[in-house]
Image (spheres, rainbow, N blue to C red):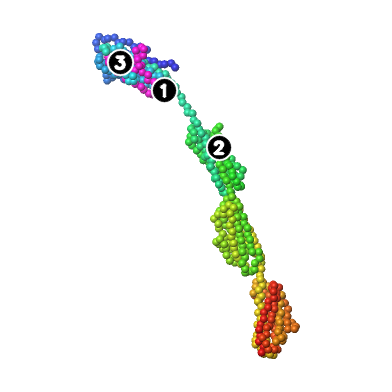
Amino acid sequence: MKRSLIAVCVAGLAAIFLSGCACTEASPAPAPAPAPKPQPVMTSGTCPVVTTAAGMTTAKMAIPTGEVNSSVVLLETTTPAEVYVGDSVDYKMTVTNLTDCPLTDVVLTSVIPANFDLKASAPQAQINKDGEAMWMLGDLAGKESKSVTVRGVPTAAGSFISCSKVDYRPVLCTSFVAVAPKLTLKKTMTSDALLCDPIKITLVVANEGTGTLRDVKVVDTLPDGLTTQGQTTFDAGELAAGQSKTFDLTAKATRTGSFTNSAVATAGTLKVDDKASVTVRQPVLGITKAATKTAFAGRDIVYDIKVTNSGDAAAANLVVTDELPAGVTVVSASNGGVVGQGKVTWTIASLAPKGEAAFQVTVKSAAQGTLTNKAMAVAACADAVSASATTTVVGKPAILLEVIDIDDPISVGGEETYVITATNQGTMDDNNIKIVCKLEDNEAFVSCGGATEGTHAAGTITFKPLPALAPKAKATWTVKVKGVKVGDVRFAVEMTTDQLQRPVIETEATQIY
């Protein structure tokens, strides 16, 4: 690059600038001239006007055009207007960058006149081979100024002339920023779920680098077995450095098992992915029910219920109900079962996988017939199950046979009447009730009657069978006899029915005198 150069000439009493900035020594005047009045510093053409003010002389030059608005560097020198020989004197030189761009390799060079003894400078000067003082000012940022202060002693009377120049390299700097955006994707989802539960999925796409990511998209691909009613593609737009965006969706499993769900985020050529897994479980209920197959009316009927969980998740809030048949009365219910509204209910907080629970209900039924009993089990996220069992309720006849004599004791020749009563104390009919009576030799048959017709032959009275005797019903027969001989007599009655496996025998004692 081409260097720019200008010289500024400064005299002890006045600075003399000639066209082209050539420096010449001033001619001695026959008599001292009056000191000029201070004038404002100006720039005109290529050379400045020197102004003396407050005992100081300042010279300025805008380089290279001489105009501040169109130049690169402004060089200023400020010296005392007049000093004494032998006194120490300081003068200052300032270089200012007039532009907004940096300047490099800035060098200020000054010729030290023979009648000036250079003592020091700040910063320290370097003396070149030509005996010039040089200050390496380095770089000047836009609008920056750097100054040099010189200290020395005039050694002889006369004009002090010092010429300075500025050397520099203008630099045009441009800048751009190299960024490294970093696309990241974090996927989280419910790790354990029941088949009926929603599965929450969260996608967080972020820019963890520098610069801006553009056209960011996120796609979540659900595996077979997971479905959603919402969207699975999301447009994140732009992500500034450090920015993130979150997207949520809800899935549902169509079956049990383990599922791995993948999502991909893209931004231009950048692509990242992340995965998450969920295990879907379900309780699977089973139920069995056993019941007393046949029961007599009014007797206990026992229902045994067993509920199992063959699934891989606990059955929470398990409720087991036993629907009672109409007309039954609950005798007892196990495990704290609650009786009400025609059913028995059990509530279990949780039934573990592969676990089972047993329940029992005891009831009675006064009515005969076939009773169907249904039990049901339900739990959170489990299909309801039910089981039924039937019981045949039958009646049982229970015939009570009673025999009494009316006039005991009787005399020989007197008559005695025996009353025979059959009472069904059971809960069902008894059929073909047959009554047969036997007389001892001390008594003679007179007559018989009652519920059915009877006949006598050789001391035996046989009544025709009574076809049926209903529960709680009674049937009565009578036999009249005459005492023929003194003695302790036993009147014997035998009863048989269809339901009795053995005859019922009853006797009544009578005294004959």
In the image, taking residue 503 as reference, residue 331 lies left or right, namely: left
Instruction: Tell me the mark number nearer the camera, choosing from 2 and 1.
Output: 2
Query: Crowdedness of circle 3 by 10 Å Cα count: few (<14), some, many (20+)?
Result: some
Res. 71 in view:
no
Could you tell which of marks 2 and 3 lies nearer the N-terminus? 3
Q: Residues within 10 Å of mark 2 (few under 14, many from 20)?
A: some
Q: What residue does disc 2 label?
A: 273
**Which amino acid, mark 2?**
Asp
> What amino acid type is highlighted by mark number 3?
Leu
Q: Earlier in the sequence, mark 2 or mark 1?
A: 1
In the picture, measured across the screen, residue 13 lies left or right of residue 288, that is: left
Quarter of the image for the N terminus: give it. top left
Name the residue carrying label 3.
118
Which residue is tagged 1? 102
Which region shows up in magenta? 125-154
Q: Amino acid at mark 1?
A: Pro
Q: Is residue 130 magenta?
A: yes
User: Mark 1 to mark 3: distance in Å?
Assistant: 31 Å
The reply to whether discs 2 and 1 touch (Cβ–Cβ < 8 Å) is: no
Q: Name the element at disc 1.
A: loop
The disc label shown at residue 170, or none: none
Label located before the other in sequence (1 or 3): 1
The residue depicted at 39 percent of the width and 20 percent of the height is: 138
